[in-house]
Image (cartoon, rainbow, N blue to C red):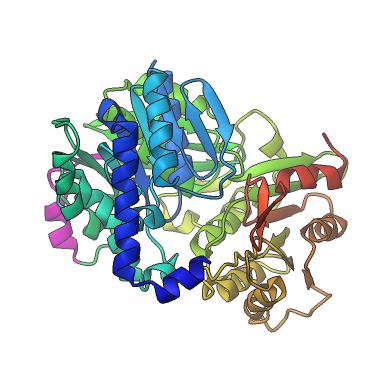
Amino acid sequence: MKKLLRKFVPESIILLYHKTLAVLANVFYGFPSRRLKVIGVTGTNGKTTTCNLIWEILTEAGNKVGLTTSINFKIADKSWINRTKQGMQGRFRLQKLLREMVKAGCQYAVIETTSEGIKQYRHWGINYQTVVFTNLTPEHIESHGSFEKYKEAKGRLFAALKGQELYSRLLRHFAPRNDAKKVSVVNLDDEQAEYFVKFEADEKWGYGVKSEIRNPKSEKNFKNQISNFKKIIATDCKLLAQGSEFDLEYENQKYHFKTNLLGEFNIYNCLAAIAVGLLQGVEIKIIQQALEKMVGVPGRMEVIYDSKRDITVIVDYAHDPAALEKVYETILSVRGSGYLPSLASNSFASLSRGSLCSPEARPSSGKHPEPHSSIIAVLGAVGGGRDKAKRPKLGSLAAKYAKYVIITNEDPYDDDPAEIMNQVEVGVKSDLNRQINQNYWKILDRRKAIEKAVALAKPKEVIVLTGKGCEEVMAVRECLVPWDDRAVVRQVLGIA
């Protein structure tokens, strides 16, 4: 039905429909965000983890905080799983959640704000006081039309911050005036940072690793643009088997941080959350405590360890090439020449990883780790007409980093799952050493694919199951079929 509407209904009518719903939802629920300090997080990857980190920091500081992300909802001390398969909720559902936050006495609302949500004006009427940009890589290109339009959709959130977006200026005629300071927070290491730092804000913050900028398009101009930014920089970063450690440089002071979250990408997520905490006046000590307390985000590098078989299963949501490669690189880098023994423990155990800030310490993306890799990759690709071009790229990455690859079903929606798997296989076969039923397999049934991976795994090897994370349903045609990767893994392993 949605495809037919997009095909035959003019885009201007569809946009008017979305705008009208946004206005009606805000009016119906009384513009609840006017009574909250709203923090929006956008970007391709890291949104969910960053939102949860911000929630932890603000809650640790004694605030009541609401949260809405692609995987979970929280209103003060109440939390539940997001089963809607929407990263950013629809206009009425989102406004209802915001009103419930107000009723619960929340001071803050942290909202994962997606490009699709922005495109459909789900952000309209929300009183964002702080907006955060994590990173940008190609995704949802078929929906937006091009990477530039995808980037512009993200940029509309920043434009709305100071009413630079036309439809945001109209908001003043509908909602009470709010003169709160508007703040932007930008990952200065991202290649697209130069675009996002241009938007107006009362105060601008930036974060990065070791240096202020890693990938400048025009370095001199960029440094001039960020000269007045408040900056936090991570140095002396170390990846650990049970998380990470790094020093934070802020206002000529240095502070040491520990986190249970794995990978360089999670250091960036921590930096974004730290920046939000600092700009909200949270003490460094409290932020440090919050990061150390947070054990992880469901379905994000989530570890299931089978002590009897001595194998590790990592469940992760990674569903685009950039995120998938980071997952594989992180696992290989913390693994070293052994395996991940302390992933299931509670202690920090430093491996011979070196500093993230040193180029030689980074995992090489050019070297093919197979056949010495201990990774068994289980993956698929999403259907519903979403980003078909990335399917072979996912397969190519799996072939590059894994010893064995098992292609399986994910969320086919109304697409033919076998055809999706064939497109992923194209990427796998780009490695000429790959032979069907020898070092890669196609297994439509996701449970049987997991069973095959477990059967193949030898002691100290790692099964990496990607694409769904902590989702509890699989989208098949018009139905949401109950499915949880983590529960199935535990069933197959025979562990509680």
Q: On screen, 297 above or below 61?
A: below
| Magenta-highlighted residues | 218-231
Of residues 314 and 70, which is closer to you in this image? 70
Relative side of 145 to 316, left or right: left
**Residue 373 pos. (x, y %):** 70, 62
Q: Name the spot of residue 323 as percent of width and height, x first.
A: 52, 58
Q: Is residue 375 magenta?
A: no
Q: Residue furthest top?
A: 62
The quarter in which the C terminus is drawn is top right
420 left or right, relative to 34? right
Which one is in front, 317 or 169?
169
Q: Is residue 36 above or below residue 222?
A: above
Front residue (pair 233, 436): 436
Q: Is residue 151 left or right of residue 398?
A: left
Q: Is residue 223 above or below residue 125?
A: below
Q: How many marks?
A: 0
| Location of residue 36 (image quadrant) | top left
Residue 83 in sight: yes
Residue 363 shows in the view: no
